[in-house]
Image: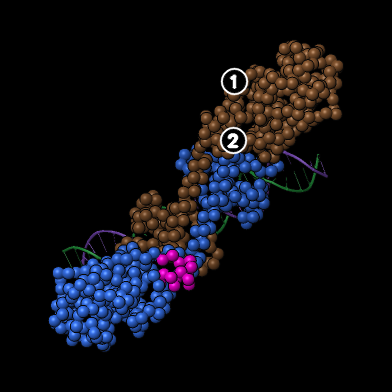
Chain colours: A brown, B blue, C purple, D green
Amino acid sequence: MNGMPSDPTIRQLRYLTALASCLSFRKAAERCGISQPSLSAQLKALETSLGVRLAERGSGSVVLTPVGREVAATAIDVLDRVDALVGLASRGPLTGVLRLGVKPTLGPYLMPHVVRRLHATHPDLRLFVREAPPIDLERELIEGVHDVVLAQLPLASAEVESVRLFREPLLLAVASDHPLARQERFDPGDLKGLDVLTLSPRYHLHEQVLRLCEENEATLRRDYEGTSLDALRQMVGMGLGVTFLPALYVASEVRGEGDVAVLKPARAGLHRSIGLGWRRASGNHEAYEALGDAVTAVAAELPHLSLER
Amino acid sequence: MNGMPSDPTIRQLRYLTALASCLSFRKAAERCGISQPSLSAQLKALETSLGVRLAERGSGSVVLTPVGREVAATAIDVLDRVDALVGLASRGPLTGVLRLGVKPTLGPYLMPHVVRRLHATHPDLRLFVREAPPIDLERELIEGVHDVVLAQLPLASAEVESVRLFREPLLLAVASDHPLARQERFDPGDLKGLDVLTLSPRYHLHEQVLRLCEENEATLRRDYEGTSLDALRQMVGMGLGVTFLPALYVASEVRGEGDVAVLKPARAGLHRSIGLGWRRASGNHEAYEALGDAVTAVAAELPHLSLER
DNA sequence: CTTTGGTAATAGTCTTACGCTATCGGCCAT
DNA sequence: ATGGCCGATAGCGTAAGACTATTACCAAAG
């Protein structure tokens, strides 16, 4: 007479469904791989905990009660989902939902290619791409907002493990009527005395450009801090200064024509390192390495990028 | 390294969902009413049996792994259905699906009223009405095809328990141009020498009419055995003989007008007893009594029927 | 009317599962 | 450095759940 109905066990539900389809305790027990008394006991326990009779064990064959049938039907439903749950666990490394954080200066220009490729090679992977300012990205990764991030290296925290994927050169963008616009490439020395625009300090680009200006006696204009690469390009086009644009953005959005000219660096060295990072404790190393390989493969097909890791 | 993944337990799933929403072992354990080590152990067991890591317990807060999130979501799904299953058991006696077997000479003429009434008084009851020849009805009840039957009494098997609901008179149907058609009532003696039609021996009506013929020197025509009451009425209308029709059929299908006339018996005694039967082992006495009451209440509103039980 | 062969229920025993308390080791903030 | 908070571990006791062997019951057969 225990009024508190405790949960049935999954085992009991399996036994019940077996009984419902065999209509015999003995056969059902055999199907379940247990002895008949064990099944009897479990069914009795189930009936007791539910407070209803599920099967009529009269003479001859077993007959389920009306509630017994409904409970058995629901049990099948439950078991199907349990099986699905177990199935979730026995899948490959790159399956299911993965939340990828990415910096806004990379996301719109690289992720479409990555998503397309992964959709083809890993149809069971559902990639949720979330953009976040680089300054927040690593923290959000640690907090569990993202499973993995595509960000600029290095990632500082000891909790985070990362691989370098590729190097993205920074290209110099000038107005098309600017004297430098005739050159194909630029030297660091060309920067001397120029007004340079860049993004807000929330972006890594800011720091990188700042140092570049200091080293080459250029002026970083702090009064115009763009909030997007598109905004930067517009300002450069209107003659407010020059700027540095990541190669992926240029390849995607600046197609030669237009009001700005883009110059490659004469010597290598001006670039940012892009890598994949994840919590060391995630234990998903394998999957993230595979994800990184996919990104690298995509990058190899895009112009300007350097794959030397 | 046990390759055989045994089922998770419902308890483990409850713990996992608690952990997923608290993101803390201690708080989750508290919510579940157990100690933190117990929850840790169960989660570990779940991870082992599934073969995947579900939660990252690093520093600070707990973060679910990607599979952990999916498993937790599926677990919520499972638990919802388990709760529904438990809920099935805690309902009143006349709820859910009940399979009612009924003889064809009664079903179409009585059940519409019964169903309508029950739908109003017991909205959670879903009555599945199945017609079957009377000779099969009791056997099918014992075999578990029906939960309860509405049949002619008596029901023979000791396994079956029954209550009498009402008595249905048999009325004499003759062609409207038959000499008897002018009378309102008939005596048994009126049958002498008449040709009498009836249903096949699979129906109780057959036996009853047979005895009536023998007692009153009427001729049972064995060459025309109708397969439905409608067919009988047609044959009577065409002058092939007279027949006996159950009062409910008459009330439903023979509305005074037409090619047949219907005579009531002058004295009571010619009737069939209709009752409700169920397996004694079903343990659902209470529900079936209630069902019987509903049928009785319906019968009380119909003409010709005698409720003396 | 008894016997036989099927059924499920019961009795007794053992192993495993699952809970508890107490304690340990790591990380962050004071 | 050092509390304070976290989860993991250790050790232990109870209860769940399996087994075998047996009993009780019913139906059909002798």
Query: Which of the pair B230/A57 is nearer the observer?
Result: B230
Residue A79 in the magenta stretch? The answer is: no
Q: Quadrant of the C terminus of chain B?
A: bottom left
Is label 2 or label 1 in front?
A: 1
Q: Measured along the vertical axis of the image, is residue B262 above or below residue A189? A: below
Left-right relation of B60 to D25: right
Q: Which residues are magenta?
A: B114-127
Residue C24: x %, y % from top left: 68, 43
* Residue corresponding to mark 1: A301
Query: Which of the pair B286/D26 is nearer the observer?
Result: B286
Q: Which mark is residue B69?
A: none
Query: Which of the pair B214/B84 is nearer the observer?
Result: B214
Residue B245: x %, y % from top left: 26, 76
Q: Is residue B188 visible?
A: yes
Q: Identify which residue is drawn at 32% across, 61% down.
A: A61
Name the amino acid type tagged 2.
Answer: Leu
Q: Identify which residue is drawn at 37% across, 65% down.
A: B129
Residue B303: x %, y % from top left: 36, 81
Q: Identify which residue is drawn at 48% across, 68% down.
A: B123
Q: Identify which residue is drawn at 51% across, 60% down.
A: B86
* Residue corresponding to mark 2: A127
Name the amino acid type tagged 1.
Answer: Glu
Left-right relation of B205 to B118: left
Left-right relation of C27 to B71: right
Q: Quadrant of residue A177?
A: top right
